[in-house]
Structure formats: C-alpha cells, structure tokens
Amino acid sequence: MIEFRGVTKRFPDGTVAVDGLDLTVEAGKVTVFVGPSGCGKTTSLRMINRMVAPTEGTVTVDGRDVMAGDPAELRRGIGYVIQQAGLFPHKTIRDNIATVPLLLGWNKRRARARADELMEVVGLAPEMAARYPAQLSGGQQQRVGVARALAADPPVLLMDEPFSAVDPVVRESLQEELLRLQGELGKTIVFVTHDIDEAVKLGDKVAVFRTGGVLAQYDEPGVLLDRPADGFVDGFVGRDRGYRKLGFLSDELPLTELPTVRVGDSAPEGWSLVADADGRPVGWVSGEGTVEQSAVLPGGSLYEVGSGSLRSALDAALSSPSGRGVAVDGDGRVAGALSADDVLRALAASRADEAA
C-alpha cells in the first residue's frame, strides 16, 4: 500500500506542483493519476520512488517513509516505466531486460533466463532477444520497458504515460496486454496519463488532478463517470461520459443467428458475413452472387460473449456496415449477432435494476 499524507511539493521559484495531497493507493490494484498538463500527476508519481522529494508531508510504501532509508534500496522494490521506454541502445533486448537483476548481483545465466521468461510474458518473440532497441517498433520497445521493470519482480510498478508515444492501434494492444499481465501478477501499479479513456479503462481507481496540484476526485471509474465531484471533473471527464459508462455495465445480451459464407460461396441478397474455414469473421459482402475476396469489407469491432461490456456490444453494432454487430466466443468464432436496439434494451433493464 502507498500513502500520501499532506504531501506538498513546492519548487524554489514558488511553483506549487502538488498541494496537500491525501491519497491511498491500494495494494494489488491499478491506480491511475489523470489530469491536464501541469496538474502534478507525474510529480506525485516520482515522489513514490524518491526521484522528487516532498516539501511537506510524507509518502509511505508499506508503512515506510520513502525519505527515511536508502533511495537505491527503495527503488529495487519499485519498477519504473517511462514514455520512451528508456532502453540502452548499445545493449541487446535480452541484456536490457536483465539490467536490474545483474545490478542486484544475479549471475549472468540466471539474469538472462529471467529476461527470456519475461519476453514471453509480455508477448515478445524469442528471436528478438539478440536484437537492439533501434531494430524494434515503438510498441515492441514499450513491451521491453515493461519487461525490464518487472525483471526483479518488484511489488510496485510506476508507469509514467508509457503508451502515449505509440499509435492508437498499438496503444490499445499495450493496454490490453497490461490488463492481462495485471490479472496474472497482481502488482500495485500507479499509472499516469492525460487520457481519460485510458484512465477509466485501466484503473481500479482513478485520481483526477486539477491544475495547481490539487486532487479533485478519487473514485472507482464507474463512480467517477456517474457522479463527478464538481464542474472541473465533469468537464474533464467530458460529454461522452455516458457512453464511457457503458464500459462498466455488462449483461447477457440476446443473440440472433448469423449465417456465414466463405470466399467462393454464393451469397444471398443483402448483407452476408464472411467467415474463414474455422468460423472466424473476416468481413461483410453486400449483394447476391459469388463472394470475391476483393469485395469483402472490414466488419468493424467484435463483441466477445461473456466478457464484453455494453459499450463493446454497442460499438460492434454501430461499427458494422450491416448494422448487425458480430458476437464471437472465446476462440474468436462467430457466436451470433446483436443490434443497437438489443444493447439499448439491456441498458434500460440495467438502469431499472439500479433504481430498484
């Protein structure tokens, strides 16, 4: 557990970066610090590993004041991931990941074995171990950064806007990977972002900071979206918060049958879903006749039965060219179809249950 008690950071020029922060980060959970530029979120994060010293108040990790002991010892128990990964350009990927274990006195064989293990954990192919950072994409470099931060198995992981420098598709993939890893490892993670969508997706709890380093609200994402504390939080969360809230609502949605065709088959009139030989969706075709690969249109997003939220279900329906969202099972095979009306009915039922 990490605690901020009356923490203020005032710089020599008089600037107050953090003002009277009281906050508890729960062990084994993801806590996200979010807010506009200059609100003190990164400064607050950096006070946890003593890269910034508080002017007033105390920051404790598992009950120990971070300013009381040796900073090097403190940091051995805290992984740190930054925006640009911060990899050593002259070291291979394996040796980048093995850096901290080697500093802790592990022998080279053990440290490299740990690096190979973590490459698999974060989704990096074994053949990348001998490459150098410049030979990897931005998303792959960020995975290396996460692996390096996890190398000594620290209980605490600090992440300072780690995914903001990559494109939206890679960013979403990295977010999903982080959620998967957290499900397996259960670390205490403090994550900094300026993106409210990223905050509500990743956070078990979200701390919204206002300019001047003042904590405006600290709540679970669903509460934050449903009941903003004031006008600032309301404005920062944005007008789309009702749509975002769908991400925290789930229900058993009724699925209708969705026949599929394969490339080379004869399609009936209207829209038809094209699937591969294993029953996984490929896209849509419109109009009757033989299905040509060149005529297949991308199918939009998919809704995974049993784990998808109402938001992902609605997105699947709205992004489909046919107006019918595609539901898939855990193996990615077509399980049926749903419509936007199905989702709205489920939302109405969910609200009725909340009011009862």
Image (spheres, rainbow, N blue to C red):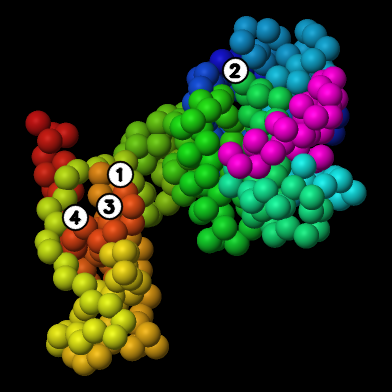
Residue 119 part of the magenta segment = yes
Residue on which the image places disc 3: 329
> Chief secondary structure of the magenta span?
helix
Disc 2 to disc 4: CB gap under 8 Å: no
Highlighted range, magenta: 95-121
- Residue 206 in view in this figure: no
Closer to the camera: disc 2 or disc 3?
3
Where residue 307 is drawn, which disc sits there? 1
Closer to the camera: disc 1 or disc 2?
1
Residue on which the image places disc 4: 343
The percent position of residue 327, horizontal first and vertical second, equals 25, 58
Residue 280 occupies quadrant? bottom left
Task: Give the structural element (helix, strand or loop) at label 3.
Answer: loop
- The number of numbered discs placed on residues in the rendered structure image is 4
Mark 1 packing: few (<14 Cα in 10 Å), some, or many (20+)? few
Badge 2 or badge 4: first in the primary sequence: 2
The percent position of residue 202, horizontal first and vertical second, equals 48, 40
Instruction: Say which residue appears at 28% left-offset and 77% top-offset.
Output: 262
Residue 187's place in the image compared with 300, above or below, is above
Q: CA distance from mark 1 to mark 4?
A: 15 Å
Residue 260's place in the image compared with 337, above or below, is below
Where residue 2 is drawn, which disc sits there? 2
Closer to the camera: disc 1 or disc 4?
1
